[in-house]
Amino acid sequence: MPLVPPGLVLSVNVLAGVSLLAFGTSYRLARVLSRGSAALAALPLLTAGVLVVYVFGEDGYRGNGTSRWDAYRSSGGALSSMFVLSVSLMAVCATLLVHAGLRNRARELGVTAFAGGLTADGTALARWNLGAS
């Protein structure tokens, strides 16, 4: 049985993305909560962590201990690049959220949260279009 089911990965991506989008579109909320909102950095890190555990976890379809990474490599290597880019963008987003939150920069915090929400939801949408395996 896989450690992280596909539904959990999609749910975490969507919830983190919607939360970041909601925070990013409310300048008033970003301004009021900016100092304490450096904790928002946990959302993109959670998304990246769940994605890493899912990708390197056991493939439930094969059931022989083979990871999804080994089982579903693309011939041109595009999925590897997409995976690295997704995790990297989430790490950069988390870093920028911490920086903006600690410096009390509400506008930077809102823009970064919005971009991070788009990235998380884009990852979920791409995963859904590829078909959760």
Image (cartoon, grey):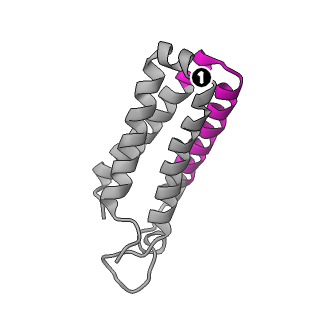
Q: Closer to the camera, 24 or 128?
A: 24
**Residue placed at 48% from the left, 60% from the top?**
76
- Residue at the (42%, 28%) spot, across then down: 21
Q: Is residue 7 highlighted in magenta?
A: no
Circle 1 residue: 34
- 31 shown above or below 60: above
The secondary element bearing badge 1 is classed as: loop
Quadrant for the N terminus, please.
bottom left
Q: Is residue 74 visible?
A: no
Residue drawn at (46%, 67%), measured in percent from left and top? 73
**Residue 83 percent across, percent down from the top left:** 51, 54
Farthest residue toward the bottom? 64
**Residue 117 in view:** yes
The number of numbered discs placed on residues in the rendered structure image is: 1
Stretch of the chain drawn in magenta:
84-111
Give the residue at x 46% y 25%: 23
Q: Main secondary structure of the magenta part?
A: helix
